[in-house]
Amino acid sequence: MRMAMIMCGVFLAATVTGTHAADSYPVKPVRIIVPFPSGAGPDVVSRTISQKLTERWGQQIVVDNRPGAGGNIGVELAAKAAPDGYTLILMSNHFTINPSLFRKVPYDPLRDFAPVTMAAFTPNILVAHPSLPVKSVKDLVRLAKTRPGQLNVSSGGNGSVGHLAVEMFKTAAGVDMVHVPYKGPVAAVTALISGEASLGFLIVAAALPHVKANKLHALAVTGKARSPAAPELPTVAEAGVPGYEIVAWQGVFAPAGTPPEIISKLSADIIAVLGMNEIRQALSRQGLETIGGPAAELGAYIKEDLVKWARVVKQANVHID
């Protein structure tokens, strides 16, 4: 009986301590690691929400760009950080692609991180150079089947989301097209505009200015639903390639072992900021759609995404070391 009372007291003390820690958090600056250079999707999201989080918490938010190795350098740094809520990471698809793409990565997405919330996403737009005689996805599939191995599709590099979007399309549509990797997304877009490449899967913010300037022709968006940024465009799936879906997502994570009370506070506060009209509009101008949702939803999504990309990478036989 005495032991039970002692254990009950310990439990209550721990609960009160955890609750108090969450109530007072944060008491110093919070760092958000972005494992990509300035201007990338995760960087845009981090910097857009950081000011409102600073106002909400009364503590500075420091965005720490740590690019390299397809995001692996920054992710490893975050995985090894103290699990106290003062180091977060804003990650994208590479978080779930790299474990299959690289023969070895210095982290385990499920073991080493605690999901906080999915922040935003953007679909890609399938675009064609105006010289290509296609007006729709069905036109493209028909043309590709009459010209197997002749249509070039640019991307920002081997293993990029743009590259894997190509591989997914080839498999789903049953066509043979040639993937041409460039040194970064800017070079890939330049190749498209010049006509050096015929097709590409570009994020909304990169595609729309050139589509509006008639330098590229938009065929479809790659998400599950039409994009508010280009509602006139059908999805690839509704345009004739059933089951095709790919988006570039940005999610917030903390090192594994971060107290659940702090995870809950982080999730609630970041979701509140994402729900602000000015934040939604700011991200929308970048082609990003805000989400916000419980940590458990992000956790479930990550598990599904790991399986999805493992299948795509295996089918494409792509590896980077």
Image (cartoon, grey):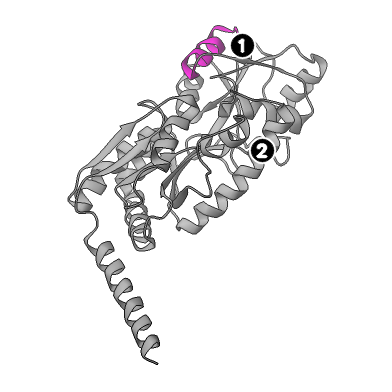
Q: What stretch is highlighted in magenta?
A: 184-196
Q: How crowded is mark 2: few (under 14 residues within 10 Å), some or many (20 or more)?
A: some
Q: How crowded is mark 1: few (under 14 residues within 10 Å), some or many (20 or more)?
A: many
Q: Relative to 90, is 296 above or below?
A: below
- Residue 190 among those drawn in magenta: yes
Residue in the picture at 32% in, 53% down: 84
Quadrant location of the C terminus?
top right
- Residue 6 among those drawn in magenta: no
Look at label 2 and name its amino acid.
Answer: Ala
Residue in the picture at 36% in, 77% down: 11
> Where residue 298 is drawn, which disc sits there?
none
Q: Position of residue 293 (x, y in %)?
A: 45, 55
Describe the element under mark 1 as helix, strand or loop: loop
Q: Where is residue 304 in the image (x, y as percent from the top left)?
A: 62, 48
Residue in the picture at 39% in, 62% down: 260
Q: Position of residue 189 (x, y in %)?
A: 51, 16
The answer to whether 179 appears left or right of 260 in the picture is right
Q: Where is residue 81 in the image (x, y as percent from the top left)?
A: 36, 43
Residue 177 occupies quadrant: top right
Quadrant location of the N terminus?
bottom left
Looking at the image, is mark 1 or mark 2 nearer the viewer? 2
Most extreme residue toward the right is 146
Residue in the picture at 82% in, 16% down: 146
The numbered mark, 1 or 2, whose residue comes first in the sequence reads 1
Residue 21 occupies quadrant: bottom left
Describe the element under mark 2 as helix, strand or loop: helix
> Where residue 197 is drawn, which disc sits there?
1
Residue 74 occupies quadrant: top left
The answer to whether 141 appears left or right of 211 in the picture is right
Residue under label 2, please give it: 310
Front in this rendered view, residue 188 or 22: 22
Mark 1–mark 2 Cα distance, whole angstroms, equals 27 Å
